Image (cartoon, grey):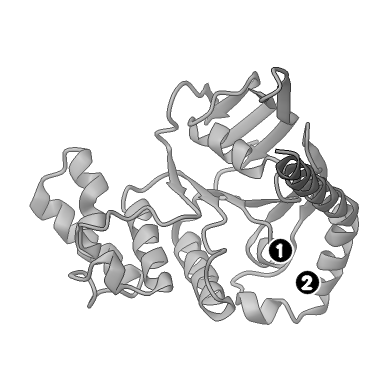
């Protein structure tokens, strides 16, 4: 049996709350991701999905439990992982080419080699003719392609993605999802993908993990996605098996989504009430 590329073993994350107590975002979460496996985590807004990803990246130390990377306890930043954020992380004063090569320069690669590799990766993501453009000159989809190249040029063994396509329109989003699957299928990195979109999770993943509403969020379901690959994310949504999987997983998470929504509405009411009494 292969050793997991990434293992979260009974991890919890607790934070100090404004009232002086402690708020436990996620509690006793265990999750293994095999080498080459694409796993998505879904759940209600505010259930701690990004908190799990930050622990996997080494940006947040778990309050309890342990994170392991290829069997070794993670201490500090996960150097085996590449991280793609929800918000754009491109440097606005650098061209697309310079953004893509920046990580290699930081690692000490000489500029000529870094530039050659960056050109190759811009070509891989369909932006060979746009390397001289600056972020403000690129569309939303182009920026995401640059961000993909910026991450993949470093050849990470694990890819961590935090709702990377949520700000895109539906057509551009589906193009980017297919782009990611094409790039992933070439060398099958391990992927932990955070999304609030159940259809996106099913269309892309080998496995979908559902989290409960917070606080103390924890997995309430885990579903193998047996749809054939390669996949077109738009076409696969029309197949009977996709619809069957969607119905089954939504049935498991619907109550938690409603619970999370009620909590959000309650928080809004409390804030508005407080403002009226100020």
Residue 3 visible somewhere in the drawing: no
Q: Position of residue 246 (x, y in %)?
A: 81, 66
What residue is drawn where x is 56% and y is 27%?
Answer: 68
Mark 1 or 2, nearer chain start: 1
For the residue pair 62 and 152, the one nearer the viewer reads as 62
What residue is drawn where x is 16% and y is 43%?
Answer: 109
Badge 1 local density, few (<14 within 10 Å), some, or many (20+)?
many
Asked if residue 179 lies left or right of residue 204, the reply is left
Q: Badges 1 and 2: C-beta atoms under 8 Å apart?
A: yes
Q: Position of residue 110 (x, y in %)?
A: 10, 45
Element carrying mark 1: helix
Which mark is drawn over residue 202? 1
Which mark is drawn over residue 242? 2
Residue 181 visible somewhere in the drawing: yes
In this picture, is 262 found above or below 58? below
What residue is drawn where x is 77% and y is 79%?
Answer: 239
């Amino acid at each position: 049996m292969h050793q997991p590329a990434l293992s979260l073993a009974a991890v919890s994350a607790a934070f100090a709350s404004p009232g002086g107590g402690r708020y436990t975002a996620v509690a006793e979460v265990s999750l293994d991701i095999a080498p080459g496996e694409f796993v998505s985590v879904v759940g209600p807004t505010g259930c701690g999905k990004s908190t799990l990803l930050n622990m996997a990246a080494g940006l947040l130390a778990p309050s309890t439990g342990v994170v392991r990377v290829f069997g070794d306890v993670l201490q500090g930043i996960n150097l085996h992982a590449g991280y793609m954020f929800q918000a754009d992380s491109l440097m606005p004063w650098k061209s697309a080419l310079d953004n893509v090569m920046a990580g290699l320069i930081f690692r000490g690669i000489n500029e000529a080699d870094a530039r050659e590799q960056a050109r190759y990766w811009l070509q891989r993501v369909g932006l060979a003719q746009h390397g001289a453009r600056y972020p403000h000159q690129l569309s939303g989809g182009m920026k995401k392609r640059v961000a993909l190249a910026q991450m993949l040029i470093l050849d990470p063994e694990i890819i961590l993605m935090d709702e990377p396509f949520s700000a895109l329109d539906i057509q551009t989003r589906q193009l980017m999802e297919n782009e990611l699957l094409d790039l992933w299928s070439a060398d099958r990195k391990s992927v932990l993908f955070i999304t609030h979109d159940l259809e996106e999770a099913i269309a892309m993943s080998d496995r979908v993990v559902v989290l409960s509403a917070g606080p103390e969020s924890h997995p309430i379901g885990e579903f193998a996605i047996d749809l054939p690959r390669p996949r077109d994310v738009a076409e696969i949504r029309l197949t009977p098996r996709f619809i069957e999987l969607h119905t089954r997983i939504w049935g498991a998470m619907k109550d938690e989504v409603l619970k999370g929504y009620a909590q959000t509405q309650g928080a809004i009411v409390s804030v508005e009430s407080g403002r009226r009494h100020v």
